[in-house]
Image: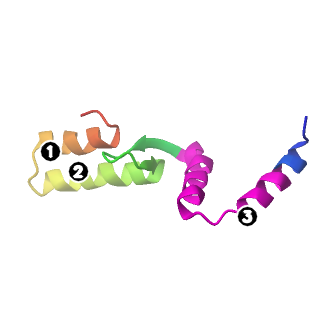
Amino acid sequence: MMSTEILQINLAQRIFSIWDEKLLNKIDQLISVEGIVAFDSEGNPLTEKQYIDQINEAYKDTDAGSSPDEVFKRIGNAYNLE
């Protein structure tokens, strides 16, 4: 079994050798999953701050005349509840 330090070095070396931007983005998303609390309607991950910002925007929309159904749809989209 590899020690944590050796595993970190091996992974870093492998990542540094990658030039495929799509693969690097996938690795970045995988590493970032820890802070993900929801997903938008397109499947993009949202951090807690991004999700709270979306909810606050929905409240502003309600104040600006959007219906509660429209606000629920926006919040539901973040959780992929549609």
* Amino acid marked by disc 1: Glu
Q: Quadrant of residue 69?
A: top left
Let me know if residue 11 is in the magenta part: yes
Quote the CA–CA distance across marks 3 and 1. 46 Å
* Amino acid marked by disc 3: Ser
- The image shows residue 58 at horizontal and vertical percentages of 24, 51
- According to the picture, the residue beneath numbered tag 3 turns out to be 17
Crowding around mark 2 (Cα neighbors within 10 Å: few <14, some 14 to 19, many 20+) is some
Q: Nearer the viewer, mark 3 or mark 1?
A: 3
Tell me the residue at 45%/53% (across/down). 49
- Closest to the observer, 34 or 56: 34
Which secondary structure lies at badge 1? helix
Q: Which residues are magenta?
A: 8-35
- Closest to the observer, 63 or 28: 28
Quote the CA–CA distance across marks 2 and 1. 11 Å
* Figure quadrant of the N terminus: top right
- According to the picture, the residue beneath numbered tag 1 turns out to be 70
- First along the sequence among labels 2 and 3: 3
Crowding around mark 1 (Cα neighbors within 10 Å: few <14, some 14 to 19, many 20+) is few
Which secondary structure lies at badge 3? loop
- The image shows residue 82 at horizontal and vertical percentages of 24, 34
- Specify whether 3 is left or right of 54: right
* Amino acid marked by disc 2: Tyr
- According to the picture, the residue beneath numbered tag 2 turns out to be 59
